[in-house]
Image (spheres, rainbow, N blue to C red):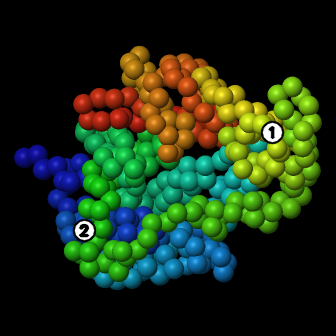
Amino acid sequence: MKSKINSIGLEKDPKDTKVVVAMSGGVDSSTVAGMMKKEGYKVIGITLKLYDDTQQTAKSKQCCAGQDIIDAKRVAGKLDIEHKILYYQSKFKQGVVDNFVESYLAGETPIPCVQCNQTVKFKDLFEESKNLNADALITGHYVKSITQNNETNMYRAIDENRDQSYFLFNTTREQLNYLRFPLGGMMKNETREIAKKLNLNVADKPDSQDICFVPNGDYVSVIQKFRPDAFQKGNIKNLDGKVIGVHDGIVNFTIGQRKGIKIAEKKPLYVLEINSEKNEIIVGEKEKLVKRKIQLRNINILSNKDDFNKEIFVKVRSTGKLIKSKVKIQNSTGDVELLQDEYGISPGQACVFYKKDDRGDKLLGGGWISN
């Protein structure tokens, strides 16, 4: 007799199913741990300590800080589940922080949350979960996942304001088949209601707002800490190549930026290009920010090639809209033609592919914007 499929798509009774829940100390992952426990799964909570706290980071609204580890421990105690803390500071520094700094020095705008998921969270935590003989690794990401015949596909969350699929485009197929995202079919207020019913101490805890190692969004101070030599004065030029100002370091600028240029012109000026080799900033009027063509590197595909014969949509920033596009992929590189104008596309950001079907917006993969 065939076993009944459980709530995470496996043919096992929950009481015989061991799951690892990545617990950051926030309401989302804590609620997921509570849901799994209530459904009868064998739950192990794992919290990652990713960086050493400073006075600034301890007080800011971030994940994986000192207070969050305490909160995760309290939730685990309340739920009566096993809880482990893994100390990944050095791995996080090498895989995420160093990459973040070097990306800014190269004139890019990095996304450390993707690097974090790609390295310590889904690579090292994935391996740790396998070592514990867990049947699945479960997170509090707002992503809808559908598992059939032991294959999982990812879709944008029902709560589009919370959707985190953009940050997960670099997940491998092996990882995706092992991962589960129970919150993808819920609205945020529903998550908080479940947390209150479970009487969790984090039910009303504010969401993390900053990049975890960047206190109060001040990324320049992080770069200054690790690379004080990065702040070299250079020229600000217009599109005709004329020097119209001086900057204090290219790391102070991102593509599309308007404030902080400090040059008076009849029309507002925006950062159009950052040339790290020449240590120059190129500025111009807003309409010059419009782009239709993008080149990608290090493309990761989670789908079959047939999906790309159909209508494709892309997102070029985490808060951006879906844009109808044509995508051509050659091995790990590709070209994207946007079928409508988009402003301020920056190298270092991700371009993520989606296809619409009867279940929603399916994540097909994505790549890093190189040009």
Question: In percent of the image, x 56 and y 20: which residue is there?
Answer: 337
Going 26% across and 75% down the picture, which residue do you hit? Answer: 196
Q: Amino acid at mark 1?
A: Glu
Vertical placement of residue 122 versus 339, above or below: below
The answer to which of marks 1 and 2 sits earlier in the sequence is 2
Residue under the point 58% across and 39% down: 350
Comparing 148 with 370, the one in front is: 370
Please tell me in which quadrant of the rendered image residue 149 appears: top left
Residue in the foreground of this view, choosing between 102 and 204: 204
Q: Position of residue 67 (x, y in %)?
A: 51, 80
Q: What's the amino acid at mark 2?
A: Ile
Q: Where is residue 263 shown, x and y percent of the image?
A: 83, 45
* For residue 282, side relative to residue 19 (left or right): right
- Quick check: 100 left or right of 72? right
Q: Is residue 141 above or below residue 326?
A: below
Quarter of the C terminus within the rendering: top right
Q: Residue furthest top?
A: 309
Nearest-to-viewer mark from 1 and 2: 1
Residue 200 visible (yes or no): yes
Identify which residue is drawn at 92% across, 36% down: 243
Give coordinates of residue 90: x percent, y percent: 67, 66
Quarter of the rendering containing residue 52: bottom right
Instruction: Report if residue 336 is visible in the image.
Output: no
As drawn, which residue projects farthest toward the left? 1
Give me the disc on residue 117.
none
Residue count near mark 2 (Cα–Cα under 10 Å), binned few <14, some 14–19, many ≥20: some
- Residue at which label 2 appears: 194
Q: Which mark is residue 265?
A: 1
